[in-house]
Image: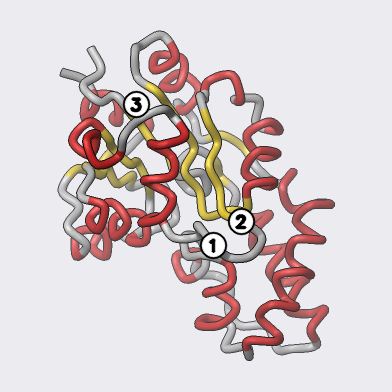
Amino acid sequence: MIKYKYILFDLDGTISESAGGIRKSLEQAIISLGRPLPNLDDYTKYIGPPLIDTFRNYCRLSEEDSRRGLEFYRDFYNKKGKYINKLYKGIKELLEKLKNSDAKVAVCSSKHQQFADEVVDILGISRFFDAVCGSNFDGSRKDKKDLIPYAVSTLGGDFEKDRKNTVLIGDTYFDARGARICNVDFIGVEYGYGDVQQMKEEGAEMFAKTPADILSFISD
């Protein structure tokens, strides 16, 4: 039996292997701005945080260039980047089991809503989710602390009453931090793009080495 009523999944690095498409889109955006490319070999530096923060903090761009970079990124990602994507082995089987349970399941991603919807569709897993929750184009709802309550509400829950019935599954310290701030359970996945130690520093205690391991943490 599944012990949570609301199960929220991060997308990039948790459900999908998406690094190639994100990196290529980021490269094209920076090139379009005429700015030097930073070293993008370490995915932990830019997969996980809201994209605008990546441009500001990791790429060291001005506010104006960061916002222009967002537009270039979205354009390339929409045309090509979102298709450079595949499911992690075992994710589909996990989602099939959850679909047959009483739990409500949602994607909870900092990715823009339109792209989150499209990626889930491209991956062929739309039928497994009761909701797909992403950020807004204006930059709102980009942090997990805002997305988690929104996702629970979208699933029909009362977040203040349902915290103990909610779990977030993710691969970065941004996910772990959002869960800690919202006071919901968190399962960190070791197969994604994040750093386990950084997740532990945000209070994470449960870690899954594979998608199949997630089931043991969410079952009675």
Residue 1 vertical position relative to residue 87 in the rendered view, above or below: above
Q: Is residue 58 left or right of residue 152?
A: right
Q: Is residue 183 left or right of residue 20?
A: left
Query: For the residues marked 2 and 1, what is the alpha-carbon distance in whole angstroms?
Result: 5 Å
Residue 168 vertical position relative to residue 111 in the rendered view, above or below: above
Residue 176 vertical position relative to residue 35 in the rendered view, above or below: above
Depth check: give the residue in front, 217 or 110. Answer: 110
Q: Please, what is the three-letter code of the amino acid marked with disc 3?
A: Ala
Q: Position of residue 188 (x, y in %)?
A: 29, 46
Q: In this view, does 174 lie to the left or right of 69?
A: left
Disc 2 target residue? 136
Disc 3 target residue? 212
Depth check: give the residue in front, 61 or 130. Answer: 130
In front of the other: label 3 or label 2?
Answer: 2
Q: Which residue is drawn at 26% across and 59% down?
A: 199
Disc 1 target residue? 140
Verify CB contact (< 8 Å) between mark 2 and mark 1. Answer: yes
Q: Please, what is the three-letter code of the amino acid marked with disc 2?
A: Asn
Q: Which mark is residue 67?
A: none
